Image (spheres, helix red, strand yellow):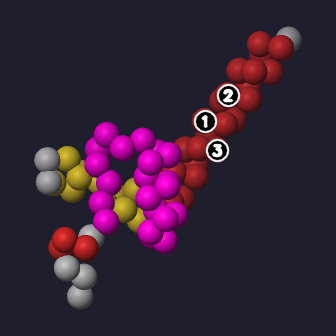
Amino acid sequence: MTKVEEIIVGKIDDTPTQLMNLMVTKDIRHIPILENNTIVGIVSIDDLLQLILSNSEVESRKLREYIK
C-alpha cells in the first residue's frame, strides 16, 4: 500500500504545464489537486492534453485573424 507521504499531488495554483511536467516525470496519469490539504479535484493527463490542444487552436485562430 502507498504511504500517504509518498502520494504525488498537485496544488490548486499549479499551472497546466507544471502538472504535465510532474505527471510525465513521475510517470503518472492522474493527480489529485490539493487546496489547504483538502482534495479539490483530480486531473488526468488527458484533461491536460485537451486543454493544451484547445489553447493551441485558439492561438492559431487568433494568429490567422491577425494576419488577414
Q: Residue furthest right?
A: 68
In the image: residue 23, left or right of residue 5: right
Nearer to the camera, 59 or 2: 2
Q: Quadrant of residue 30?
A: bottom left
Element class at badge 1: helix
Q: Is residue 56 left or right of residue 11?
A: right
**Mark 2 Cα shell of 10 Å, populated few (<14), some (14-19), many (≥20):** few
Q: Is residue 36 left or right of residue 18?
A: left
Instruction: Residue 6: name its quadrant.
Output: bottom left
Q: From the image, tell me which residue sits under label 2.
A: 59
Which residue lies most toward the bottom here? 1
Whether residues under marks 1 and 2 lie with C-beta atoms below 8 angstroms apart, the answer is yes
Image coordinates for residue 63, horizontal then vertical, percent: 75, 21
Assess whether residue 17 is covered by the magenta stretch.
yes
Residue span colored magenta: 8-28
- The percent coordinates of residue 42 (x first, y second) are 34, 58
Q: In this rendering, is residue 32 above or below 40?
A: below
Q: Are marks 1 and 3 in contact (CB under 8 Å)?
A: yes
User: Which residue corresponds to the image point at 62% horizontal and 39% vertical from the top-left?
Assistant: 54
Query: Label 3 near label 2: C-beta < 8 Å?
Result: no
- Element under label 2? helix
- The residue that label 1 is drawn on is 55
Screen quadrant of the C terminus: top right
Task: Compute the Cα span from label 1 to label 3.
Answer: 5 Å
The residue indicated by pointer 3 is 53
